[in-house]
Image (tube, helix red, strand yellow):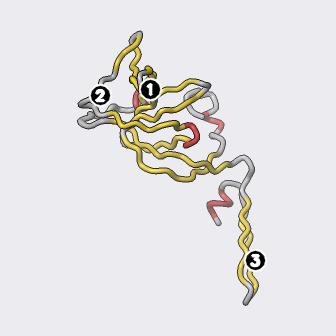
Amino acid sequence: KTNIERIGGAVDVDSTPGAGTTWRLSIPLTLAIIQALTVECAEDRYVIPQVAVHELVYVDGRTTRIEYASGAPVYRLRGKLLPLVRLDQTLSLPSQPRDEGVYMLVLQADGRRFGLVVDKVLNTEEVVVKALNARFKDIGLYA
């Protein structure tokens, strides 16, 4: 109940002996529950909306080569070059030494496909999405 009230919702319990109990949960419309893929990068966890994930590819560091086009890393996926974005570099996280491969999430944003490189893919789960605190509104990297 405390968690629901903390996000601006309400819990109403109606109990009738011998008939049962009715629970009513109200949450603000500004919140949404979405399916998300939980990933790990530099030992931190992040969630990616599952609707944006088109494909998940394991990139074996020993047998797969990352190519470069105009100085930018790309991955050849079924004959087409896919631009790569490393989550650790984008968020200025410490890079982890990689003896093994990494995972690449093929995402689409603004009509463009790209590969997001992360250390691990953990699981899928439902997450509550709500607006960022006003302190973060001017940071263009987060949404």
Crowding around mark 3 (Cα neighbors within 10 Å: few <14, some 14 to 19, many 20+) is few
Residue shown at 44% from the left, 38% from the top: 56
Above/below status of 21 relative to 143: below
Q: What element carries label 2?
A: loop
The answer to whether residue 39 is left or right of residue 35 is left
Q: Do the residues labelled 3 and 1 touch (CB within 8 Å)?
A: no
Residue farthest to the front, as pictured: 78
Residue shown at 52% from the left, 36% from the top: 54
Give coordinates of residue 124: x percent, y percent. 49, 50
Kind of residue indicated by mark 1: Val
Kind of residue indicated by mark 3: Asp
Residue shown at 65% from the left, 66% from the top: 1
Crowding around mark 1 (Cα neighbors within 10 Å: few <14, some 14 to 19, many 20+) is some
Residue farthest to the top, as pictured: 70
**Which quarter of the figure has residue 80?**
top left
First in sequence: mark 3 or mark 1? 3
Give coordinates of residue 74: x percent, y percent. 40, 21
Query: Residue 64 has which mark?
Result: 2
Q: Mark 3 points at which residue?
A: 14
